[in-house]
Image (cartoon, helix red, strand yellow):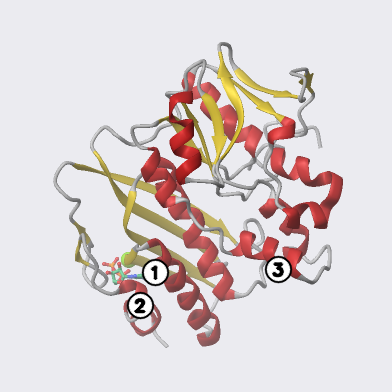
Amino acid sequence: MGEFELIRRYFAAAPCAQAAAGIVLGIGDDCALLQPAPGMQLALSTDTLVAGVHFPQSCDSFLLGQRALAVSVSDLAAMGAVPLGFTLALTLPDAEPAWLEGFARGLSQMAQSCAIALVGGDTTRGPLSLTLTVFGQVPAGQALTRGGARPGDLLCVGGSLGDGAGALPLVLGEQRAEGEAADYLLQRYWAPQPQLALGQWLRGRATAALDISDGLLADCGHIATASGACLQVELPRLPLSPALQALVGERARDCALAGGDDYRLAFTLAAEHLPALQAQWPEAVVIGRVVAGQGVQLLDGQGHLLEPPRAGYQHFAQDLGLHGD
Ligand code: ADP
Ligand code: MG
């Protein structure tokens, strides 16, 4: 099968590559053409997933397709954007029909649930890696950035934390578990649902937002730095799923604080918006507040400072001497 036959069969013909609003021209020409609605700005983000680094070399391709798109679209959710389209740059060691079929199916399933269309890409031979670029639209000037948190704001997250980190030993085959709790965590790892509707609702309400990909404390640090404020996280308020607690017990809090792969939104907003948030988004939880200062502080239930666990995942951290191990 040649490159063009592969693109046609698995990608151009996939459900996710069919005509959609805002897509003037999709796969097949030198460029795709997107048309944001009048008054909208284009939001775009790119992510690379490398086999053996971001996912196990031998994982199921359907699950990989779902996850690859979900983690990319999560960045659109974090900006309050509405998805338009995405491109896929795929590097493959060989064209394996069963692998490609599963991958395209996983991609299409997540694309459908996020209402985003595949509009182009590139296909090359080499060690397995995926680069997805997502495009969305957001009313001009209303995107949620990391930079607006103000002392007095509440710090909130969009739902339970640590599930992805709790699933990781199962994903890597370091731990074996079966049953409902394991299934739930694996589902949260392989198919995290980007919090698009929440992100859009937060426009004009949240003062800062991001999606948690590297661990709560590390990502709160990004808001703190960009906003020039201090984020206080109260340990007893962390939302932990029953499944995570059942599977990892005492380690659940560390998974929530420092584990990656949550893809929940973390955001700050003025307390006046709290009743509407709780009415509309019952899974959203207040986990702390913004105060004057800098950095991130972890507090116990009495407001005493605690020592945070090791920070989230960072590529090159060892090269740069950022981590001790
Ligand atoms: P070019 O040579 O102009 O860069 P290509 O031959 O790489 O074009 O690709 C042909 C068409 O197929 C383009 O529209 C491109 O966007 C699309 N395409 C290539 N690979 C993929 C892929 N993995 N998924 C979706 N579209 C793809
Ligand atoms: Mg090309």
The answer to whether the beta carbon of the residue marked 2 is less than 8 Å from any atom of ligand 1 is no
Q: Earlier in the sequence, mark 3 or mark 2?
A: 2
Residues at marks 3 and 1, CA–CA distance in whole angstroms: 22 Å
Q: Amino acid at mark 2?
A: Pro
Residues at marks 3 and 2, CA–CA distance in whole angstroms: 27 Å
Q: Which SS class for mark 2?
A: helix
**Mark carried by residue 198:** none
Residue at label 1?
A: 112
Q: Position of residue 318 (x, y in %)?
A: 72, 37
Q: Position of residue 172 (x, y in %)?
A: 75, 63
**Mark carried by residue 15:** 2
Occupied quadrant, residue 167: bottom right
Residue at label 3?
A: 183
Task: Look at the picture and state if 299 lies above or below 280.
Answer: above
Q: Amino acid at mark 1?
A: Gln
Residues at marks 1 and 2, CA–CA distance in whole angstroms: 8 Å
* Residue 126 appears in view: no
Q: Which SS class for mark 1?
A: helix
* Left or right, 192 with reference to 133: right
Q: Label 2 crowding class (10 Å Cα cut-off): few <14, some 14-19, many 20+?
A: some
